[in-house]
Structures are given as structure tokens and as C-alpha cells.
Amino acid sequence: MLLNLLNAPRRLLALVALGCVALLAFGLYLQHVVGLEPCPMCIVQRYALVLVAVVSGLTALTPKRPLLLAGAGLLVLLSGFGAFVAARQSFLQWYPPEIVSCGRDFYGMIETFPLKRAIPMIFKGSGDCSAVDWTFLGGSIANWSFVCFAVIGLMALTLGIRLARQR
């Protein structure tokens, strides 16, 4: 089935966009219905997922091969960034810092500190980022987020390679 989708790149990109929207909806469900508050790294992963959804959705609208190739390349970069943040959070969950502090929330960091100082603080994580509040099949939200970003990145890379080889 994946090979069939790789032969129809616009369908694959539309499916990626739809999957991202579903993941974002699930994250909002966990936040607003279940009551899980997202940490700063979770918020950054959400933004990465929104960007992946927008890029894949817009790229799915074009039939032009150069634009499909550029979109696939951008998806590799965006999903790589999302996977990096998710991997960092997973690391913090597996090896929590010795001094656990709740730290500031994402918006508090952005409002209080200049962006140059806020971004390193986000990636440093906090006590909230190392907490595992929900699991599925033994994996935390950060673990599953990494898997999703990695799968999207590999699909985009495969799609990009196939498009580059076509004449």
C-alpha cells in the first residue's frame, strides 16, 4: 500500500496532512478533556506538527514535480526538527534531571525573555518535560511523537528520492 501511495505523491501528502490534524486533535483532547497540561517541549512539537500539516497540505495541492520535491525536502527538515525535540524530551523522561523544577510555561518564557534566551530554555526542558503523564503500549507521548515524526520524515525522504529519480 505504501508503494501505491509513493506512486501518488499528492495522496500521500494529503494523508500526512490528515494524520497531523488527527494527532493535533488528539493532543487537544488530552489537554482539554483528560486534563494533561503540555510542557514547553510539547508545545514546540505541536508547532512542528502544525508546520508539517500545512506544508504537506499545500504541497498536496500542486501537480508540479519541482514543487512536490521542494515540499518533500521541507517536510524532511520539519519532521527532523520535531523528531529532535521529541527525542530530547524522551531522553529527559528516561533520565530525569536531578534537580526537578517546574520551570516556566512556554508563553511565560517567550513573554519574559528575549527569544535568544527563551529558545535554549525550551530545549533544556523542565520538571514538567520529564514527567510521564500518559502512556500507550509502554510509550509516552514524547516517544510516540518521535515515532510519528520519524515515519513522516522517512516517507518524505523516500518520496523526495523517488521524485528526484523521475525524469
Image (cartoon, rainbow, N blue to C red):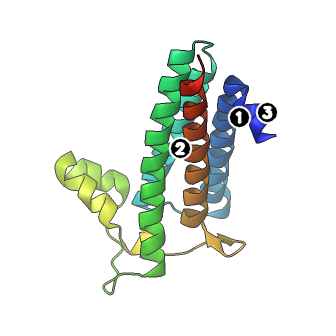
Q: Are marks 3 and 2 in contact (CB under 8 Å)?
A: no
Residue farthest right in this picture: 1
Q: Quadrant of residue 8?
A: top right
In primary-sequence order, the first of circles 1 and 2 is: 1
Residue 15's mark? 1
Residue that label 2 marks:
49
Examine the rendered structure and indicate whether residue 118 appears above or below residue 11. below
**Which is closer to the viewer, label 1 or label 2?**
1
Residue that label 3 marks:
4
Q: Amino acid at mark 1?
A: Leu
Question: In this orientation, which residue lies closer to the viewer: 117 or 69?
Answer: 69
The reply to whether residue 36 is in sight is: no
Say which quadrant the N terminus sits in: top right
How much space separates mark 3 and mark 2, taking CA atoms?
24 Å
Q: Residues within 10 Å of mark 1 (few under 14, many from 20)?
A: some
**Which is closer to the viewer, label 3 or label 2?**
3
**Which is closer to the viewer, label 3 or label 1?**
3
**Across the whole image, how many numbered discs are drawn on residues?**
3
Q: Amino acid at mark 2?
A: Leu
